[in-house]
Amino acid sequence: MASLIAILDLKGKPLIQRSYRDDVPASCVERFLPLVLDIEEEGQQVTPCFSSQGINYMHIRHSNLYLLALSARNSNAVETIMFLYRLTEVLVEYFKELEEESIRDNFVIIYELMDEMFDFGFPQITEPKMLQEYITQESHQLEKPVQVRPPNELTNVVSWRMEGLRYRRNEVFLDVMESVNLSVNSKGDVVRAEILGVVKMKCLLSGMPELRLGLNDKMMFENTGRVIKGKAIEMEDVKFHQCVRLARFENDRTISFIPPDGDSELMTYRLSKPDAKPPIWVEASIENHRGSRVEYLVKVIAQFKRKSTANNIEIYVPVSNDASTPKFRASTGRAEYAPDKSAFVWKIKQLAGGKEFLMRAQFLLPSVTNDEDVPKRAPITVKYEIPNFTISGIQVRYLKVVEKSGYESHPWVRYITQNGDDYSLRTAQDKGSEPIRQSTY
């Protein structure tokens, strides 16, 4: 429980606050930032939870704002912190961007949301779609109610879905999206390979259906005694939307749920696979001609199945800041100089699996530098997207829709693999002007 919730700017000035109990004075909010600064001056790390003079301060930071909860009791700090994150998600859902201006322009709605989401210091409703059903961004005139009763969404056991939904065409779309984070050292060894997966869902189904999703999960086959046909994977760090029945998943690895309406994120997972073959591999050889010019020979290899095709490949190769007069020759796609990124980029619209291509680049260097002055070369970075392909091998075995009316439904599944936030390959630090060896490529 918490006694007071407040949103502050970076200077510690409260923009909005709501008191739910009388055991914490409002003046404690203004003491928050000085306490944070005192902790930092002492060389200590500011933790999300700390106490001072009998008051517990629990906070998170979003953009240029602090979201703060105060309590005078031994509260559940983790639950309170999670509530602050949920409050952030709800406000972002309402206002698209959560910043000082959006708070100042929407005091009334924020107070309504804080009252519905928190009751006498206890978290209550945190589902954005449910809140949007009866707290809208439109102005309302006060009318005398005929009957005082709580909204249906509050009494519904399935809080993330409304009753009475109707669609002319019942469809559900699943997007299995995997992002690959990769780090390759200058010797060509993969030092880190990580797959971050997410299953996104768009549900356009009538009524209150139950969905059952089956994946080629290794543990599912082992628990049910089924024969493994094809490749099975072992997912790590699996996290589900609250609609998934966790007890059933733990028992027989069946993913069953009543889905939220519209767009939602059903599950996320992570795979650490250092032995995984990178889908897009890039090699580069660099020849430095005594500081007068530098030549690059870049090779890209599509290391995935021939039936798949990568789209919108962009390969960023770093160059020296004083390089000029670029010349390019590519066997496919086009290359261009990007001086604002201190790199040149090789763009390929489509790259079929198993294919490989070469590109040459030449730059003039206006000044002669010593080898000792050559800075450490930045890594090559790659962007791409491969539809109908997953690097982990995850597959949707079935997606069943069960609804009491027995209507016909149309499930659709799509797979996408793309680069993650860190997909980088380092090149060997060149020393001198050794010729480019064509046989290596």
Image (spheres, grey):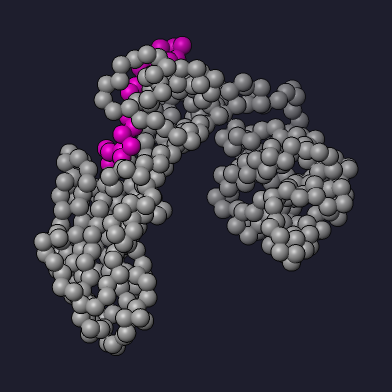
- Residue at position x 80%, y 54% from top? 29
Total tally of numbered discs in the picture: 0
Does residue 274 show up magenta in the picture?
A: no
Does residue 391 show up magenta in the picture?
A: yes
- Residue at position x 29%, y 59% from top? 187
The answer, for residue 384, to whether it is visible in the render is: yes
- Residue at position x 35%, y 30% from top? 233
Q: Nearer the viewer, residue 374 or 416?
A: 374
Q: Nearer the viewer, residue 308 or 358?
A: 358
Q: Nearer the viewer, residue 269 or 25?
A: 269
- 53 to the left or right of 433: right
Looking at the rendering, the stretch of residues picked out in magenta corresponds to 387-413
Tell me the quarter of the picture where residue 374 sits. Answer: bottom left
Residue 393, x across and y down, in percent: 31, 34
The answer, for residue 412, to whether it is visible in the render is: no
Q: Is residue 2 above or below residue 33?
A: above
Residue 262, x across and y down, in percent: 47, 33
Q: Nearer the viewer, residue 193 or 196?
A: 193
Q: Is residue 282 above or below residue 430?
A: above
